[in-house]
Image (spheres, rainbow, N blue to C red):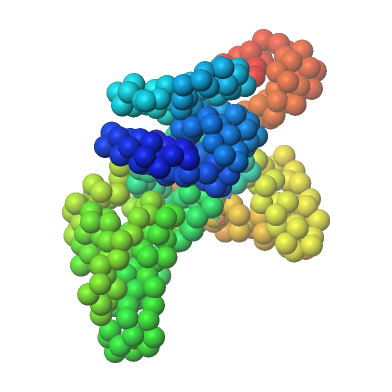
């Protein structure tokens, strides 16, 4: 943070102050007239204001009041000539940050401005943190799941989202990597800018380069008209590259250079164009394996994985199944205009014991079939999942484990329903207190 809006009606003062400040590394915007300077002031302005007190038109005092209407926490440092100390004192009472006397002492003014900028930085950081908290509540409605692994994933996401770090998202197919990528963009400061996604596995190999970098007309056979590539279109925003190891290896090299130099050239052009974007990428295989097999450049990998997030498979967070099911149920019932019949306990038990090789995507499509099914609700899930369960056969969970999972689910749900009140849970499930205690400890369940 280094912006200073400087206002003084006297050209010589303005110019010498500007020169000093620029030499000290501040980015200065100078004005001779306070009402013009006001147009640069916005809430969360990343800088401070340095203003003369006595000026024709809006004077320093009135100027400070107007600024406070936009953002009361924006420091205003006043330049005071001989004789306007009284006015400066009044301004400070009204909320101005500090004043420096004219003729100014360059070192002192630089010191004062540095301190004001530090204070400003703190205010803005605090606001961003508060905003991130509000946004992270929005995260729960996008990325459904409250199991322990999902809670820690979301915590990591909210932590790194506001930074500029490149993020590599790993996880099996259908675990929600794309949802994670989009949510990171939404939680970042770039959320009003572009978000572009490119599935590297879905573009023909010979088109990958032009998809990323764009081309001029006639750059290659069939290149009609010019085309802006994804890297250019994502400028200022976020680019998400899905299934990265499907990108041709020579194009990976070009991508790495573009990331390092922050510039690109369109195919068939010699003009360098600056680009700046945050890169999120995803893979559903092990990067080490892809590197070993020559499908992923190691140097590119190190550039992309500043932060590595892993989205856990659904079988490792079965606690999320009931929540995800009801989320998709509402969605599907809405889309298809059908009724949202909730699942019977037996159906839930079957879902809890299924292994979900297709992860959340599989659960989502199963839920769609569920709402579209003409069978009575209790028969639908056994029917839809029977083929895949039969397919898993030996590898599927034993009857004992299924029963355990179901038991755990019932106790957990009853605890939640009764706000952790053990007495009510005992009545609800008709079991002795001792049995409940044993089961809670066996299944690692807490009252809250
Ligand atoms: N936690 C979640 N909350 C809500 N919807 C989810 C969640 N996880 C996944 N989904 C939904 O499941 C489907 C699959 O998710 P997504 O496309 O993000 O998976 P992926 O990990 O990118 O898979 P692939 O590796 O096959 O590209 C999408 O429709 C997505 O909206
Ligand atoms: Mg994906």
Rendered residue at 65%/41% (across/down): 323
Tell me where residue 266 appears, x and y as whole percent. 29, 73
Point 28% across, 84% down: residue: 219
Residue 209 in view = no
188 or 152: nearer the viewer: 188
Residue 275 in view (yes/no): yes
Residue nearest the viewer, comparing 433 with 226: 226
- 272 vs 373, left or right, is left
Question: In what quadrant of the picture does the C terminus appear?
Answer: top right
Residue 344: x, y in percent?
75, 43
Residue 262 figure quarter: bottom left
Q: Which residue is drawn at 33% across and 85% down?
A: 217
Residue at point 23%, 54% (across, down): 260
Task: Quadrant for the N terminus, please.
Answer: top left
Based on the displayed image, in which of its 4 quarters is residue 65 positioned?
Answer: top right
Residue 272, horizontal then vertical, whole percent? 25, 67
Horizontally, residue 247 falls left or right of residue 321, namely left
């Amino acid at each position: 943070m280094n912006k200073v809006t400087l206002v003084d009606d006297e050209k010589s003062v303005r110019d010498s102050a500007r020169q000093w400040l620029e030499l000290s590394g501040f980015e200065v915007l100078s004005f001779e007239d306070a009402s013009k300077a006001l147009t640069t002031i916005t809430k969360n302005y990343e800088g401070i204001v340095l203003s003369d007190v006595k000026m024709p038109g809006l004077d320093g005092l009135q100027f400070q009041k107007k600024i406070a209407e936009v953002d009361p926490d924006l420091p205003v440092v006043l330049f005071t000539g001989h004789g306007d100390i009284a006015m400066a004192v009044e301004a400070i009472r009204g909320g101005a940050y500090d004043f420096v006397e004219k003729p100014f002492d360059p070192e002192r003014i630089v010191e004062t401005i540095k301190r004001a900028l530090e204070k400003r930085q703190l205010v803005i950081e605090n606001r961003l943190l508060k905003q991130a908290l509000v946004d992270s509540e929005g995260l729960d409605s996008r990325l459904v799941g409250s199991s322990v692994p999902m809670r820690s994933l979301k915590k990591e996401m909210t932590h790194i989202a506001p930074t500029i770090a490149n993020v590599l998202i790993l996880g099996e197919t259908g675990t929600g990597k794309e949802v994670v990528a989009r949510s990171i963009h939404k939680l970042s400061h770039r959320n009003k800018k572009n978000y572009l996604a490119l599935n590297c596995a879905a573009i023909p190999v010979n088109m990958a380069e032009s998809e990323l970098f764009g081309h001029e007309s006639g750059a290659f056979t069939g290149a009609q008209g010019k085309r802006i590539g994804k890297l250019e279109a994502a400028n200022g925003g976020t680019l998400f590259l899905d299934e990265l190891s499907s990108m041709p290896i020579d194009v990976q090299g070009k991508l790495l250079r573009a990331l390092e130099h922050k510039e690109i050239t369109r195919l068939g052009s010699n003009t360098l164009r600056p680009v700046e974007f945050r890169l999120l990428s995803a893979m559903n295989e092990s990067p080490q394996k892809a590197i070993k097999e020559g499908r992923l450049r190691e140097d590119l990998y190190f550039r992309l994985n500043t932060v590595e997030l892993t989205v856990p498979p659904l079988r490792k967070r079965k606690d999320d199944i009931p929540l995800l099911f009801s989320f998709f149920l509402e969605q599907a019932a809405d889309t298809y205009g059908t009724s949202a019949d909730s699942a019977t306990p037996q159906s839930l038990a079957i879902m809890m014991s299924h292994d979900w090789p297709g992860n959340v995507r599989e659960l989502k499509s199963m839920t769609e079939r569920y709402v579209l099914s003409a069978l009575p609700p209790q028969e639908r899930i056994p029917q839809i999942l029977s083929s895949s369960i039969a397919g898993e056969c030996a590898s599927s969970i034993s009857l004992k484990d299924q029963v355990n999972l179901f038991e755990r689910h019932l106790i957990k749900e009853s605890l939640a329903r009764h706000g952790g009140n053990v007495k009510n849970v005992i009545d609800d499930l008709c079991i002795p207190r001792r049995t409940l205690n044993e089961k809670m400890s066996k299944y690692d369940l807490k009252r809250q």
